[in-house]
Amino acid sequence: MTPAARHEVVLRLDDVSKAYSGTLAVKRATFDVRRGAVNVLVGENGAGKSTLMKIIAGVEQPTLGRIVLDGETVRFPTTADAVAHGIGMVFQELNLFGNLSVAENVFATREVTRGLRGIDHREQERRAAALMERLQTGIDPRALVEDLRIGQQQLVEIAKAVAQDARILIMDEPTSALSATEVEVLFRVIADLKARGVAVVYISHRLEELIRIGDYITVLRDGRITGQAEMREVDTHWIVRQMIGQDAKDFAKGVGHRIGDVVFEARDVSLPRATGGLAVDHVGFDLRAGEILGVYGLMGAGRSELLDCIMGRQRLATGSLTLDGRPIGHLDTTDRIARGLALVPEDRQREGQVGILSIAENLTMASLYRYVRGIHIRRAAERQAVAGAVTDLTIKAADTDLPVSSLSGGNQQKVVIGKALLTHPKVLLMDEPSRGIDVGAKADVFLTMRRLAAQGLGIVFVTSDLEEVMALSDRIAVMSNGRLTALMDRADATEAKVVAASAAGHAPTTPRPTAPAKVSA
């Protein structure tokens, strides 16, 4: 088969538009999907990428335009119609049943049966185990999905799509929660799919990985296609210019300000694992007003668990915590928020927002007490706070009374950040704040972090992105296997030092001496 035939157009969205409540999310877009190739779709949050993919997958119907499959005009009134035509999709927001096993999720709606004897659970588990082995996950097909960490859940979502033997497979941010090792495995699976003639549509905000695996690229901005090319003809600068109309914003540029006194201290924070050992192993550090402390580590290092301990979300955590010189270890999560702690969790869908509530309600749900007088909510004050958050965080929302689930993934993340900021915290904890955020929105969030630090807010942010932690941090803490393996000033840090510390085997650097009161965390 010649390269031209191998990459022939198998599906085309022809002059497609999609309107929601009078707002055009996609405007006269023509998008080709080529067989045996990775067809990259990229754009800022809210640019219309997910809407375009939902049209292909039968989740949404185009307002104008048509879908052409194998030269024939088709309609996908439901997702089942799209699946029947060989189209599968890995959604950006996980679409799994937490109370079912991995195998049951992989074969949901396509159960393996034994005639009148019902579902053949053993055969489903055997096939799911083979898929997990192919993806090199080590996940037990009998495990409940709700017991898996978010990265493992992402792999289950990918396995579910691969199991459908789709001829067109759409992947919406498939690596957003994966470790570097898991990403490499996914790329090998994608290469195998290409070799089998599968057309892969790939959406991601990680520009380097797009250039690495993509064959063709289409760029969206504000619902319109602004650029299309073969990937070998472009570079990251071209992609960014097509996405935001200019070169990337420099989030690494600091805002000059003085770092103040110690505002928060943690000593000997520990958390036992259910399987034995410690998920957080006697971790201690302090944080100063106006300081950004980056916590770097790979998946499973204990970073998220440390933030949960600080927020009072782990009942078995021990250690000592002080905020403004006062012990807070005896307080529950609500009281810690009132005292001045706030958390932006990694999993915005399950832990950061309520999808059926409005954008405004999600923004103020943690700070509603600030707008209450007697038994009534001061709606004018609440609306003013919501409008301020939308402006400060550049949340793209036509109406804040719409459900938060109507927003793109990146704008939902901004709402979660805004909810935390409206509690007026003294210390802000951020777990992977750039997860699922495009290059433009990421720059907005990071500039907001710097602006808040300049106003005296202490920020602890967790990331597995080496570039981010080097660019944003005033100090860098490195975790590995639950331990703090390094704590260094940014001026003394190098990428080599940070990576070496994340590989463990290093004694923790001694933090600045303090003497917090000893209370249970």
Image (tube, rainbow, N blue to C red):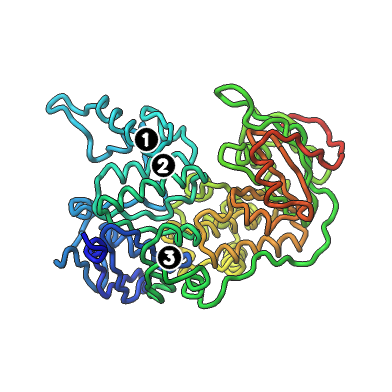
Residue 428: x, y in percent? 68, 51
**Residue annotated with mark 3:** 42
Which residue is pictured at 64% across the width and 27% down the height? 278
Q: Secondary structure at mark 2?
A: helix
Quick one: quadrant of the N terminus?
Answer: bottom left
Image quadrant in which you'd find residue 454: bottom right
Give the side of residue 152 with respect to residue 480, left or right.
left
Give the side of residue 457 with respect to residue 200, left or right.
right
Q: CA distance from mark 3 to mark 1?
A: 28 Å
The amino acid beneath tag 1 is Met
Do tag 1 and tag 2 residues touch (Cβ < 8 Å)? yes
Q: Secondary structure at mark 1?
A: helix
**Residue annotated with mark 1:** 132
| Residue sitting nearer the eye, 455 or 299 | 299
**Residue annotated with mark 2:** 155
**N-term mark: 3 or 2:** 3
Q: Secondary structure at mark 3?
A: strand
Position above or below: 490 against 141: below
| Residue sitting nearer the eye, 210 or 262 | 210
Position above or below: 389 against 117: below
Q: Is residue 411 visible?
A: no
**N-term mark: 1 or 2:** 1
The amino acid beneath tag 3 is Val
